[in-house]
Image (cartoon, rainbow, N blue to C red):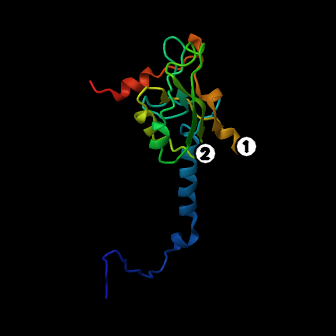
Amino acid sequence: MQLTNRSEIVVNKKMTFMERLYLPAILSGLMITVKHLFKKRATIKYPEETRPVAAVYRGWHVLKRDEQGRENCTACGLCAVACPAEAITMTAAERKKGEEHLYREEKYAEVYEINMLRCIFCGLCEEACPKEAIFLTDRMVPSNYDRGGFIFGKDKLVEGTSPDTRIDISKRTNAHRKP
C-alpha cells in the first residue's frame, strides 16, 4: 500500500566501464572546485570591512535626547511591557530640583537595562514608546566573551549630548513612514 507518490523505484543497473573508473566524476568535481576559486568571496573581513545595512535594520538600541540634551525617557515602562523576551528592566525615579536640564519630565529612568542576550530585536519597544525615547539603530552589537558585558545600562544606551555623539535615526524613521 502506497500512502504518498514520493517513493522512487530503485534500479540496480550495472555500471559502465567509465563509471567504474570514477575518473569523470572526480574531474567534474575538481572543475567545480576550480570554478569557485575565481569567484568573488561571499565573506568579508569584519570588522575592518562592513556591509551596508538596510534602512530598516534593527541593531543596537539608543535612548534619545531632545534638542536641549534632556533624556526623552520618562520611565513609563511600556517598552518593558511590550518586550516579548522580557529583556528590558528599569527603575523609575523622580526628578529633583536643579535636574531640569537632565530630564524632560518629572519622572525618569534611574536604571535602564537591556539584556542583549535575551533581546530578539523585534522593535516592539520602539513602537510602544510614546515619547520617542528608544530606537533601534543601524549599529551592530559588539561581540564579547563575558555574558555580563551584554547587559547594557544607561552608559551604553543613552546618546551623548554633543552634536558629534548624537546618533542619526532619520533614515530609520523615514523608512517606516509611507509617502
Q: Where does the image place residue 88, in percent across and percent down from the top left?
A: 55, 40
Kindly state the secondary structure of the residue where label 1 is placed: loop
- Residue type indicated by callout 1: Asp
Q: Say whether marks 1 and 2 touch (CB < 8 Å).
A: no
- Marks 1 and 2, Cα distance to the nearest angstrom? 11 Å
Q: Which of disc 2 and disc 1 is earlier in sequence?
A: 2
Please name whichever residue, 98 or 160, is drawn nearer the observer in this view of the structure.
98
Residue plotted at (48% across, 29% down): 135
In this figure, which residue is indicated by the disc labeled 1? 146
Residue 46 position within the rendered picture, expressed as x and y whole percent measured from the top left: 63, 34
Q: Secondary structure at mark 2?
A: loop
| Front position in the image: 37 or 120 | 120
Residue type beneath disc 2: Leu
Residue marked by disc 2: 117
Q: Position of residue 147 (x, y in %)?
A: 69, 45
Q: Residue at x 51, y 48 (%)?
A: 85
Point out residue 28 in the picture as x, y percentages from the top left corner. 53, 57
In this rendering, position of residue 66 left or right of residue 9: right
The furthest residue to the front: 97
Circle 2 crowding by C-alpha within 10 Å: few under 14, some 14–19, many from 20: few
- Image position of 117 with respect to 6: above or below: above
Dividing the picture into quadrants, the one containing residue 143 is: top right
Task: Give residue 166's mark.
Answer: none
Q: Is residue 85 above or below residue 60?
A: below
9 or 141: which is nearer to us?
A: 141
Q: Quadrant of the C terminus?
A: top left
Side of 152 where 13 appears, left or right? left
Q: Residue at x 59, y 43 (%)?
A: 37
